[in-house]
Amino acid sequence: MKEYHNLFSVFNGFMRIKTECRFCVIDKYNISKLTLKQIEYLKKFDEHEYVTISQLAEDLNLSKPSITEMVKKFIQLDCVKKEQCDHDARVYYLFLTEKGKGIARLEQIADEDFIRRVENCLSEEDISLLIELLSKVF
Amino acid sequence: MKEYHNLFSVFNGFMRIKTECRFCVIDKYNISKLTLKQIEYLKKFDEHEYVTISQLAEDLNLSKPSITEMVKKFIQLDCVKKEQCDHDARVYYLFLTEKGKGIARLEQIADEDFIRRVENCLSEEDISLLIELLSKVF
DNA sequence: GTTAGTTAGTTAGTTCTTACCTAACATTTT
DNA sequence: AAAATGTTAGGTAAGAACTAACTAACTAAC
């Protein structure tokens, strides 16, 4: 019982550091200025790199004007770029900028930073041990 | 380098299980039907148990009608109860229902479930070891 | 090589929802 | 009577969607 509370509080501390790493990324890319919907869409975007407006509308189940609006905002925010197709001037390809990718991959980047920090605090031996312990949980 | 990737993927698996626990709680209390603001306010509520409308308005920096509206919705959702004061019939005390508390404490409950699950997968010895390892991270 | 029809994306204007607000009010207490 | 508590009515601003109507560009038929 005491063990349980110990694990709980140590785990909380561990998670607090993970949250810190998350906030670093949020600050770096100014993510708090975006709405949740926008972040959600940037993540979807990241799975559909180099799509057209129409394709994206279909994939996200939104109307084309909605995509147009959304893309306009994202271009202003320097998250997305638009590039006209060579063989068909009606068509535009969309892709994420570095900033856009950073936002879309917030969790991965934060987790990587966090793991690096964990690694720096532990010896090789400790790390192997931690891997062993964590992989026992299912 | 290999160790790093190993730790990363094992950690991801670990976090996936944590997320599962979170979703269990979200499903249990139907939390996905609420807006983020509502969840935020339930959390604030949880820190101000047995306040009046006016006190809450002041604490949250909102107008009294906003609180009235919010409380009305929460009562419909069975998250909050209202009780008239005995000595002053103008005054109403507000408090969270069990459901309301469950939502306000989503993270704690999910973390507790998760830790319990971790505990079930590890021996006493493993747990002590894990506590030791996690507390080395700062 | 026009013409007719289609496709890609944009613009304009509308609707709905959330999350607030102020002003006016009824009830109760002091 | 004055002050306080909470409610009602009505309004605003922002976000996230929509439909309808448009231009520009392409394709195929004649």
Image (spheres, coloured by chain):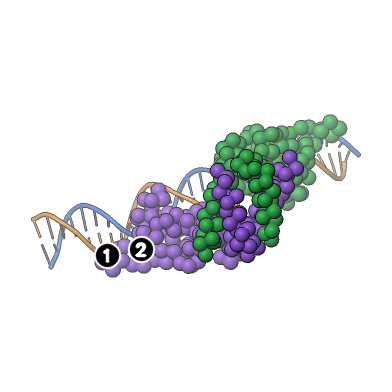
Chain colours: A purple, B green, C blue, D orange
Q: Position of residue B54 (x, y in %)?
A: 77, 44
Q: Quadrant of residue B69?
A: top right
Name the residue located 73 percent from the left edge and 40 percent from the top edge: A1
Q: Chain of mark 1?
A: A
Q: Is residue A97 toward the left or the right of residue D28 in the image?
A: right
Q: Position of residue C12 (x, y in %)?
A: 42, 58
Extreme residue in the top direction: B86
* Amino acid type shown at disc 1: Asp
Few, some or many residues within 10 Å of mark 1 (<14, 14–19, 20+): few
Name the residue located 45 percent from the left edge and 54 percent from the top edge: A44
Q: Secondary structure at mark 1?
A: loop
Q: Chain of mark 2?
A: A
Camera-nearest residue between A83 and A29: A29
The quarter of the image holding the C terminus of chain B is bottom right
Q: Position of residue A93 (x, y in %)?
A: 36, 63
Residue matched to label 2: A93
